[in-house]
Image: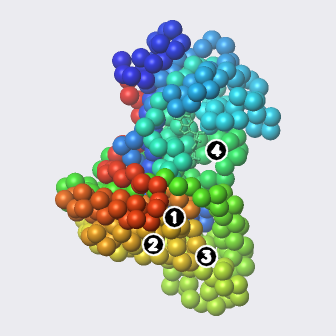
Amino acid sequence: MNDTARAFRDLYGQPSHGVWAAPGRVNLIGEHTDYNDGFALPFALPHRTEVAAAPRSDTLLRLHSAASDSGVITLDLATLDPAHRPRGADGWAAYPAGVAWALREAGLPVGGADLHIRSDVPTGAGLSSSAALEVATGLALTELYGLTPTRPELAALARRAENAYVGVPCGIMDQTASACATEGHVLRLDTRGPRHDHVPFDCAAAGLRLLVIDTRVKHDLADGAYAERRASCHRAAARLGLPALRDLPFEELDGALGRLDDPVARRRVRHVVTENERVLRVGELLGAGRLRETGALLTEGHASLRDDYAVSCPELDLAVTTANAAGAYGARMTGGGFGGSALALIDAEAEPAVARAVTDAFARAGHVPPRITPVTPSAGAGRVV
Ligand code: ADP
Ligand code: MG
């Protein structure tokens, strides 16, 4: 019995029927591409969310998270409706409740269940604790009831929960990474389809390390800017007569920019098209075992997000420039921006020097101390016990 199962038994007074886990993710590259039908290269973190669960004979869903002091929240599956979310489902409970709702909507007849949730994925750090929670819940509920959606189906249902029930207009990347990633690989995602394959990325064997630098800030701009960038991309695609910006080939970028008169739209389009190209090139380099050479593309990606897409912030820029000055092969913000985390590709032995340089730079700038964690591409969701 693991700690999550033990906590379940202490809480509900009976043993759980299993424990399921799903990881957070970081995106190696391919930012703000998923709502443009584009490409991304996320991988699963070693950090994960565990859900211990047992079925019930009624339609109640009882939810408890070690991360919340809200106690046990009880909802009735039979009455879940995104238009009339019950009070208890307004906060964090909307994520697991939304998953149960999406599964049932899709004709997967999950019944009542007791759930206890425990996670070491930092929340709100751009590492997708929300997808980890959704996918772990979805796996727990479906396996409790003997249902077997494929992993991409599970990811799509988790995304539907977040879009339609929680009300966050995210793309498919986070849930796909959490549900489908494999250890030692990045997931090469074509969000049109969606389709994916796995590209080896064994940092340790190459003497490399990936550092996640959590800036621990989240600027208020994030939600509004996300909606604005999304709308601006969709407008530009329509203006260019394309279904999505994904349909603008890199070779035709300059010509297309000449057909857009709004300078801001031109910058947004340039980011999306060059970013898709960078994802494809990084994927090829990884496939060829040329890991260090990806660094320059990571840094180029950051410059594009900072200058063309305008979603970076001083803390992220400082993390990136400092890591690079301290010897990183490359670094970039990862996630939606305006805070959250940056990622740096470094030689394994450079970790103390890079971590110290970034921590010192943050202190000198008067920022909150960053949280710096080495990460390795880890396994996607699965049953733990
Ligand atoms: P991110 O996915 O980048 O961590 P989000 O804002 O998308 O940030 O999701 C964070 C939210 O997900 C939290 O505010 C909380 O509502 C919910 N959440 C994530 N993990 C947990 C958990 N272990 N327990 C309860 N709620 C969680
Ligand atoms: Mg999230």
Amino acid at the residue labelled 2 = Gly
Question: Is disc 1 placed on a helix, strand or loop?
Answer: loop
Residue wearing tag 2: 301
| Amino acid type at mark 1 | Glu
Q: Is residue 138 above or below residue 262?
A: above
Please identify the quarter of the rendering in which residue 260 is found: bottom right
The answer to whether the residue labelled 3 contacts the one labelled 2, judged by CB atoms less than 8 Å apart, is no
Q: Of marks 1 and 3, which one's residue comes earlier in the chain?
A: 1
Which quadrant is home to the C terminus?
A: top left
**CB under 8 Å between discs 4 and 3:** no
Q: Is residue 162 visible?
A: yes
Q: What's the distance in space between the residues labelled 4 and 3, CA to CA? A: 25 Å
CA–CA distance between discs 1 and 3? 12 Å
Q: Are marks 1 and 3 in contact (CB under 8 Å)?
A: no
Is the CB of the residue bearing disc 4 within 8 angstroms of ligand 2?
Answer: yes
Amino acid at pointer 3? Arg
Real-space Cα separation, disc 1 to disc 2, in angstroms: 8 Å
Q: Which of 219 and 367 is in front in this view?
A: 367
Can you give x and y, in whole percent of width and height, for residue 147 in the image?
54, 28
Nearer-N-terminus badge (3/2): 3
Measure the C-alpha gap from mark 3 to mark 2. 13 Å
Q: Identify the residue under disc 4.
A: 162
Circle 3 sits on which residue?
268
Q: Earlier in the sequence, mark 4 or mark 3?
A: 4
Q: Distance between the residues labelled 4 and 1?
A: 19 Å
Of the residues under marks 2 and 4, which one precedes in the sequence? 4
What residue is at 66 percent from the left and 36 percent from the top? 91
